[in-house]
Image (spheres, rainbow, N blue to C red):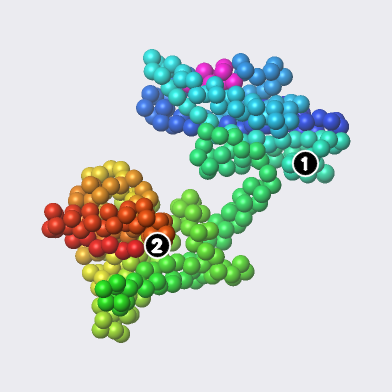
Amino acid sequence: MRKQLWAAATRLQQEPGYQLALLFLDLERFKLINDSLGHLAGDQLLIAIAKRLNFYLNPSDLVARVGGDEFAILLENANQEMAIEVAELIQKELSVPLLIDGQEVFTTASIGIVLGVSEGMDRSGWNLDLSGKMYSDLSQELLRNADIAMYRAKAEGGAKAVVFDQKMHDVCVSRLRLENDLRPAIEQQQLLLHYQPIISLQTGKITGFEALVRWQHPSRGLISPVQFIPVAEETGLIIPLGWWVLREACTQLAHWQQRFSTPLTMCVNLSTKQFSQPDMIWRLDQILRHTKCDRYSLKLEITESAIVENDELVVCTLEKIKSLGIGLSIDDFGTGYSSLSRLHKLPIHTLKIDKSFVSPMHIDRENAESVRTIVSLAHNLGRVHPSLVMSIFA
């Protein structure tokens, strides 16, 4: 593939009117199939898919496996319309089950498409700068951009094809810079916490705060968590970031507890990756001991996704957190896959109803009814299971 792609890149540079399309395929569910049926079955699946791809393509087209479950397809003299047509044909063929070891196996693919057009042709919608590029550089750029488009297809839900454009590359570059800058941000004290007050609807008084992390970048200014938290989640940086947030929030809580007589609570988000760390309980205990904050005033918020699977392990972990005296909340309730019927199994003190339900309550009757139902069922659950006293936050 690399040799033929290099030759195609050479033609792009030298032959007016030449064009190509490169498709990058990533098979979905392959790891599941490999793990459940075995590596031999996985190899058979790859061979069967390669045969299908070759069968429906022209003799001049090239199919190559470029990774564990990834394929590249080089279409010469193909424009965008033809490339999309091929991608749709591939998706249609992959939707037909394959018989592997006597079992029907289904798979789909995320497909990235990059187009190459030489001098003398309309380059609208195309973005490779041919000037001054070595052929090997251009071939690598084609592969890279097709790969970027493939990951965009996966990010959009998979089982689809996406055509590369320069904005995708710009996003990748920006994301990489963000990641590189985020790594030293904690040590360089670029992160800070904002404290959002929690107000009782019964008394109108502040009963506590939620710690929200912000990033004061030295050159880019204040960066929203919407931008950097997904990068932290993807790279694993959410773990050291999360512990820093908890340590800072507990330090602030201890300071307020010494200064004010009014009891206050502190709510801190615990990421799914933190929740699954084997030393999580030890770390929690160490932070509480070091900061000397009142542990009974601390509430940890976990998302629904953290408690969907591994029921026994989840319950055991939550019970250990509870044994430290820490309160537990489910954040953004209603957006995940947990249900109120499961809550009696979990030592949860608080439900935070997601703002997507709360914000439109005054104009959307169905949303208002959904919120009333959650509140009512949660309170009923507390009456049926007296050990589970449930508070509702919106």
Residue at 59%, 38% in the rendered image = 150
The quadrant of the picture occupied by the C terminus is bottom left
Q: Which residues are magenta?
A: 45-53
Give the Cα distance between marks 2 and 1: 47 Å
Q: Main secondary structure of the magenta part?
A: helix
Examine the rendering and report whether any part of residue 133 can be seen.
no
Q: Which residue is mark 1?
A: 124
Q: Is residue 52 magenta?
A: yes
Q: Which residue is mark 2?
A: 362
* Mark 2 element type: helix
Q: Could you say which disc has been placed on residue 14 in the image?
A: none
Q: In the image, is 1 to the left or to the right of 31?
A: right
Residue at 83%, 44% in the rendered image = 131
Residue at 70%, 16% in the rendered image = 59
Examine the rendering and report whether any part of residue 60 can be seen.
yes
Q: In the image, is 149 to the left or to the right of 263?
A: right
Q: Position of residue 13 (x, y in %)?
A: 83, 35
Q: Position of residue 95 (x, y in %)?
A: 50, 24
* Mark 1 element type: loop
Q: Find residue 195 and report its image quarter.
A: bottom left
Name the residue nearer the viewer: 156 or 252: 156
Q: In the image, is 86 to the left or to the right of 350?
A: right
